[in-house]
Amino acid sequence: MAFQNKNLSVIAYANGFTLWHYAANETLEAIATAGYFNSVKTLMNVGDIVIVNASDTTSIKVVGVSSDNITLSALS
């Protein structure tokens, strides 16, 4: 399954930082694949946080950019 705009929402925004929520009937592994969020890369910034509700788990991820792809990685 591919990214769907309707499943992405903004929870909070301030000073260039956005807290996102994404819920989909896909595994976290599929959602966290580099490039999954590329269709909205003009909206997301490095350091934004995404709360992901996947079909197998819920996780908090940080947004990054790698080789022109939006990436999600573990919050450290």
Image (cartoon, rainbow, N blue to C red):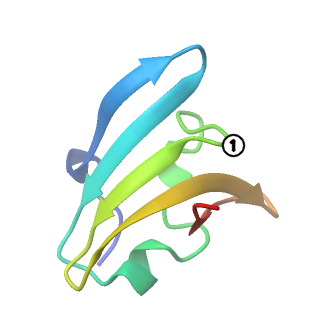
Q: How many marks?
A: 1
Where is residue 66? Give x, y as percent: 78, 62
Locate residue 9: give its quadrant: top left
Horizontally, residue 10 falls left or right of residue 76, namely left
Locate residue 48: give its quadrant: top right
Q: Residue at x 65, y 43 (%)?
A: 47
Q: Residue at x 42, y 36 (%)?
A: 19
Where is residue 57? Give x, y as percent: 26, 79
Quadrant (top left/top right/bottom left/bottom right) for the C terminus: bottom right
User: Around disc 1, counting alpha carbons within 10 Å, would you say few (fewer than 14), some (14 to 19), or many (20 or more)?
Assistant: some
Q: Secondary structure at mark 1?
A: loop
72 versus 10 height, above or below:
below
Residue extending farthest to the front is: 76
Horizontally, residue 64 falls left or right of residue 66, namely left
Residue extending farthest to the top is: 15
Horizontally, residue 52 falls left or right of residue 39, namely left
Q: Amino acid at mark 1?
A: Val
Where is residue 56? Give x, y as percent: 23, 86
Quadrant (top left/top right/bottom left/bottom right) for the N terminus: bottom left
Horizontally, residue 61 falls left or right of residue 12, namely right
Q: Residue at x 73, y 55 (%)?
A: 65
Q: Which residue is mark 1?
A: 46
Q: Residue at x 41, y 82 (%)?
A: 30
